[in-house]
Image (spheres, rainbow, N blue to C red):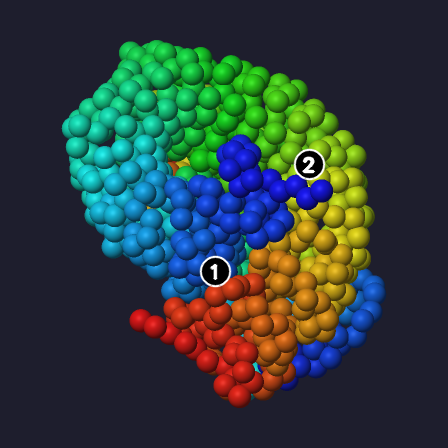
Amino acid sequence: MAYEKVNELNLKDTELRLGLPGTEEVIQEQEFSCVRSNKRPFESNDEEAREEEASTPPTKTQIVGWPPVRSYRKNNSSVSYVKVSMDGAPYLRKIDLKTYKNYPELLKALENMFKFTIGEYCEREGYKGSGFVPTYEDKDGDWMLVGDVPWDMFSSSCKRLRIMKGSDALALDSAL
Amino acid sequence: MYLRLPSKVLERILFFIDSNDDRNSVSLVCKSWFETERLTRKRVFVGNCYAVTPAAVVRRFPKMRSLTLKGKPHFADYNLVPDGWGGYAWPWIEALAAKNPLLEEIRLKRMVVTDECLEMIAASFKNFKSLVLTSCEGFSTDGIAAIASTCRSLRELELRECIVDDLGGDWLSYFPETSTSLVSLDFSCLDSEVKFSDLERLVSRCRNLKSLKLNRAVTLDGLESLLRRAPQLTELGTGSFSDELSPEALSKLSKAISACKQLKSLSGLWDVLPEYLPALYSVCPGLTSLNLSYATVRMTDLVDLLRRCKKLQKLWVMDLIEDKGLQAVATCCKELRELRVFPSEPDLEEPNVALTEQGLVFISEGCQKLESVLYFCVQFTNAALITIARNRPSIKRFRLCVIEPFAPDYKTQEPLDQGFKAIAMGCKDLQRLSVSGLLTDKAFEYIGKHAKNLGMLSIAFAGDSDLMLHHLLSGCKKLRKLEIRDCPFGDTALLENAWKLETMRSLWMSSCFVSFGACKLLSQKMPRLNVEVIDEMYPPETRPESSPVERIYIYRTLAGPRLDMPEFVWTIHKNPEIGVSHLAIK
C-alpha cells in the first residue's frame, strides 16, 4: 500500500541528518508525488499503478501547477510552435511562425537551423538549384509547397514543415 | 513630570501617516493611541480575509474609506487549490454595506466575487469611487454593468486577470451619458466585444481618463480612434495588435500613438506583428513600464524597440528576448528596477530559445537599480547566482524558476546551495525569494541564517529532510508567508517550531510528508491557528494518524475556524474529543 511505504519514509525523514539527497529512493518518492498530482492512491490495487509510475519517469506535463505560470497567462499565450523536419536530419526542430514577417525571413532561419541552402523560388517551377524543397502540411492535411500563397495565409494554416531533399524533391520539381 | 500627548494633536500627526505598518506600530503604544489611530485610519488592509471577521474590522475602523482584502493562498494561481475552497467577498460587502455607507474603494485579490456582491456595492455606497479586482472570479458582466450604471462617482474600474462569466459586451453601454469621472478603466481580461461607439463616447467625455486597458476584441482601427480622443493617457493596454492594416492606416495609428506625449506605461500588444512595432517607437523614450509578455516577437525586433526605451523601469517580456536581447537591455535601460522573463512555451520538452543564466547576469551587471526579478530558465549555475548577488546587492525580490525540477548546476552537477547562499547573504534587503533547482537542506540553512528581512519564501521540489523546514522556521525572523510543495519533510520540524506559525500570516504545504496526527497536535497546541487540511479523496479521520495529508493551509486568525468550507476542506478542532469536522454553512 502506498501509504505504508510513505510511512517508512516518514521515519527516515524525521532523522535529523545532513547531506546531499542520498538515495535513489528519496528521489523516486519525490517523483511519485509529482506524478500523483492531486491525488494520493491509498488502495492496494494501486500497486500496479505505482509500479508503472516507477518505471516511466514523470514528464513535465504531468506535474500539476508546474512550472508556476498562471493559467490566465497560459491561456492567453499566443505562442504556437510548428514542428520542422528535414529529411535526413536526426531530430526535429520547432519554430514559431508568428515571429517571422515574410517568406525570406523564414527561409533564412530554416537555412541557419539546418545548415543548408534553399534554391531560388519561382512561381512556375518551385525551388530550383539545391535539391531542397520546403513543404508544409496545411489545416486540411495536404502537403503544399512553401511560397505559393500569401504569407499571412500560410502562417495561419501551416501545421508543420518538412524540408524534402534528394529524390523526393526532384520528383516534386519535375511534377511541377 | 508626566506629559501626555493630547489626542487631538496625535490625530493631526496621524493625518500624515499613511503606511499601515507605521499605523499598526502606533496602535500598539497604548490604549489611547490605539483609539486615536483606529478612529483616523482610512485605508485598511487585510492580508488574509479569514484572519479576522468582517464585523471586527468594520467595528474597529469606523472611518474606513478603502478596504483591501486577499483571499486564496498564492499557490491557487497554479491550480493547487481546488475550486470552491473559499475566499468569499460577500460577508465583507454585507458587513460594510450595513455599517460603512461612505466606503469609497474596494480592492480584492484572489477572492470569489458574485454578481450579488457587485450589485450590493452599487446599491450601498453612494460615494463609491474605485473597484479593483485582481485574479478574482465568480461574477459575470452583469455585475460589472450594475457598477457602471449606478456608481455616479466611479473613478476606477479595473479587472486584472479575472475569470469572468462573459455574457457579452453590453456592460460598457451601461455607463450613463452623464458619467465623466473615470480615471482608470481596465477590461483587458474580458473576451466579448463592447459596443465600440459607446466606448468611443465614454473615452471622449471622460477628460480625466489616464489609464485605459482594452481587451483583445478592440481592433487597431478602434485603438487609433480612441487614442485620438484621449491623448492625455499615461497608461495604455492595447487590444489585439495584428489586424491587417494598410500603410495609410498604420501611419494614422503611428500618429495617434505619438500624440500621447504623457504615455508612461504600455501593455497588451497581443499577437503583435513585428512590422507594427515601429508604430510604438515615438513613445518609447518616455516609457517607464512595458509589458511585452504577450508579444511573440523575436529578439532582434524586441531589441529595436527596447533600445529606445532609455527610461524604462519595469520590463515584462518572454524568453524570446534571449541572452543577447538582455545584454542590449542591460546597456540601454539603465533605470531598470523590475524584470520579469516568462517562458514562451512552458511545457516544451526541448527548450527552443537561447535564454540562459547569462541573460540575467548581464542585467545584474548593467542595471544598477535592479530590485525585482522573476526569471524562468531551463537551467542555472551557482557561479551565475554568485555573480548576480555580488553585482546587485540591491535586489529585494528574487524569484528564479529553473523549469526542470531537481536540476543541478548544469556545469558542475552540484546542488544550487552555494548560489542561493550568495543571494541570501549578499542581498541584505531581500524580502521575497523563490528557489528552484536541486537544493539540499544546506541551502535552507543558509537562507535561515542570512535572509533576515525575508518576508515571503516559495519552495518546490527541494530539500532532504525536516532540517530544511527547521532552518527556515527558526531562522528567518521576518517570515510572513511560506509556501512549499513537493518537499520531503515531515512532522518534527513543524511541531518544534509551532510557535513561529503565529508570527506568520500563513503556511502552505502540499505533497509533503506531514501526517494527519501532526496536524491534530498542532491545532490543539496552538489556539490561534486554523489548521486546514485539504483532501479531495478522503476525510482525514478515515486514515491512520501517520498517513500524510495532501495539502495543509495553516494561518493565524482571531476569527476561529471558518464556517464556509467545502466538503474537501477539514478544520481540526481545538477540542480533541470533537476531532475533525467540517463545518459548513450554505
Q: Chain of mark 1?
A: B
Viewport quadrant of the C terminus of chain A: top left
Rendered position, B85 above or below B113 = below
Q: Position of residue B517 (x, y in %)?
A: 61, 81
Q: Nearer the viewer, residue B96 or B460?
A: B96
Relative to residue B62, is residue B345 drawn left or right?
A: right
Q: Position of residue B35 (x, y in %)?
A: 51, 49
Query: What amino acid type is highlighted by mark number 1?
Result: Val
Viewport quadrant of the N terminus of chain A: bottom right
Determine if residue B444 is in view.
no
Q: Chain of mark 2?
A: B
Q: Residue furthest right?
A: A18
For label 2, the SS is loop
Q: Nearer the viewer, residue B78 or B276?
A: B78
Relative to residue B530, is residue B134 drawn left or right?
A: left
> Label for residue B395?
2
Q: Nearer the viewer, residue A108 or B585?
A: B585
Determine if residue B315 is in view.
yes
User: Residue at 69% across / 59% down in the picture?
Assistant: B462
Mark nearer the viewer, 1 or 2? 1
Give the residue at mark 1.
B52
Q: Using the rendered view, name the quadrant where residue B155 is placed.
A: top left
Query: What amino acid type is highlighted by mark number 2?
Result: Ile
Rendered position, A72 above or below B50 = above
User: Residue at 57% across / 53% down in the picture?
Assistant: B31
User: Residue at 49% across / 56% down in the picture?
Assistant: B48
Q: Residues within 10 Å of mark 1 (few under 14, many from 20)?
A: some
Work out how far the residue at label 1 is from the one at label 2, CA to CA, in angstroms.
33 Å
Rendered position, B494 above or below B8 = below
* Marks 1,2: beta carbons within 8 A: no
